[in-house]
Amino acid sequence: MTTLIINKKQYQLELKGHETLLEVLRDHLGLTGTKTSCQDAECCACTVIINGKAVLACITLACDVEGAEILTIEGLARGDELHPLQTAFLEKGAVQCGFCTPGMIMASKALLDRNPQPDQQQIRDALDGNLCRCAGYSKIFEAVSYAAELMRGAQKGKEAHD
């Protein structure tokens, strides 16, 4: 049995040992927000966060992340309340066809968690490799900057409340 902790929920799975994390998320657990595209580490559509780092689920063996904290796009929202990154992507028009969006958001979250005030070059570097077939990069970069502002504002409000 393999124990995976995904979106703060523990799963006990009988795996063969060769399944990728992407296969387990989508096929075994029904978490289809993480997208399948190239399956060769070329597009980053399958980006998830493992122990705080953006990781490609298509080339990560599920058995290699046993016990790690895995966060997928499904784990960002709290009930009906969207994460600030999700809100920013919607408000800034960074969602076109939506296929690349989960990977972009997860890579952006990993960036903002380690650097809450990234400059434009840091945003570009963090999203380097994430392919958007609609070529909506400028709106995506704008959305990440806006999300950083939203998150700083929420943090200041929380500190004032405490």
Image: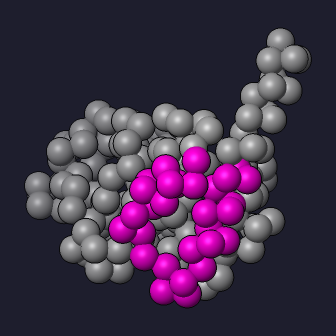
Q: Is residue 158 above or below residue 54?
A: above
Image check: 35 left or right of 89?
left
Image check: 94 left or right of 107?
right
Q: Position of residue 66 (x, y in %)?
A: 24, 39
Q: Position of residue 56 (x, y in %)?
A: 31, 59
Whether residue 44 appears in this view of the structure is no
Identify the main secondary structure in magenta: helix
Given the current orientation, which residue lies at the most extreme left position? Answer: 17
Task: Inspect the magenta stretch and tell me whether residue 106 lies in it.
Answer: no
Residue drawn at (80%, 65%), measured in percent from left and top? Answer: 91
Q: Position of residue 25 (x, y in %)?
A: 38, 60
Compare residues 156 and 16 and report the one nearer the observer.
156
Q: Position of residue 109 (x, y in %)?
A: 54, 47
Residue drawn at (21%, 74%), measured in percent from left and top? Answer: 40
Image check: 149 left or right of 10?
right
Dividing the picture into quarters, in which one does residue 65 lie? top left
Q: Is residue 25 above or below residue 8?
A: below
Residue drawn at (42%, 56%), measured in percent from left and top? Answer: 125
Given the current orientation, which residue lies at the most extreme top position? Answer: 162
Whether residue 133 appears in this view of the structure is yes
Dividing the picture into quarters, in which one does residue 130 lie? bottom left
Q: Quadrant of the N terminus?
A: top left
What span is colored magenta in the figure? 119-147
Task: Specify the color scheme.
Answer: one colour
Dividing the picture into quarters, in which one does residue 90 lie? bottom right
Residue drawn at (35%, 80%), measured in percent from left and top? Answer: 37
